[in-house]
Amino acid sequence: MGNLEKRFSNLADLNIVNNEMWLNTFRKYGIDEKKIVLTGNPYWDKYFHIFNQTNFSKEPIHDQPIKILIITTPLVEHGHWSEQERDQIISNLINILSKKNEFLFSFKIHPTSESTQIYKNYIKKMNTSSKIYQNESLWEIIENYDLIISYGFSMIHTEIALAGCKMILFNLNNDFKIMPLVNS
């Protein structure tokens, strides 16, 4: 990582930072306050428009069956889990949810890192029926669901928290970093 102090210099006329963490870091390493501008992150502009056009209910869920979207994360594919760890979590989750008539559930898997065939095999093995979404945008399908269940770590968790959607995020004791917005 090197010496952080060498990364920062007062030579620039303007330093644009997108959040308070960077603002504080620049201050800490001696950048003149008058040369720092906090702008926000343009990444969120698209989501601001999506969230303003979508109605996520803050009310308790009264509908039956409760429609659950399970958002997976590619922990096996990125080397954080073994296939057996994924199998145990997904199989247990399907087993629990499929025993209850008041739940319907579908999967939203990673658009590039996960295989639909793996989830089709889970569904077949557990003798249940569920939709599997992969290439669809979460924001195109989310209004069809009452609740999101997820695990691991992903930027999508931050987007869901910002949108104010109901989400259960399992803590599986893997020491995954929980983003501040999700944690709050």
Image (cartoon, helix red, strand yellow):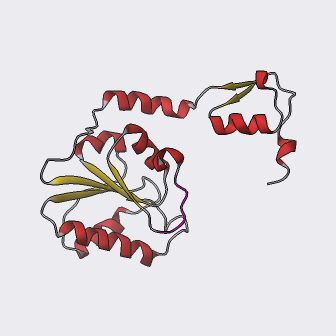
On the picture, is 59 further left or further right than 47?
left
> Residue farthest to the bottom?
84
Q: Viewer-proximal residue, 111 or 91?
A: 91
Q: Position of residue 92 (x, y in %)?
A: 30, 73
Q: Position of residue 157 (x, y in %)?
A: 44, 49
Quadrant showing the N terminus: bottom right
* Residue drawn at 49 percent across, 65 percent down: 75
Q: How many marks?
A: 0
Q: Position of residue 166 (x, y in %)?
A: 32, 47
Q: Viewer-proximal residue, 44 or 34?
A: 34
The boundaries of the magenta stretch are: 173-178
Asked whether 174 falls inside the magenta stretch, the response is yes
Q: Is residue 123 visible from the viewing direction of this image?
A: no
Please determine whether, in this image, residue 38 is positioned above or below residue 171: above
Asked whether 20 falls inside the magenta stretch, the response is no
Q: Is residue 63 visible from the viewing direction of this image?
A: yes
Q: Main secondary structure of the magenta part?
A: loop
* Residue drawn at 12 percent across, 63 percent down: 101
Q: Viewer-proximal residue, 167 or 138?
A: 167
Q: Position of residue 172 (x, y in %)?
A: 45, 68
Please determine whether, in this image, residue 183 is positioned above or below residue 52: below
* Residue drawn at 22 percent across, 60 percent down: 130
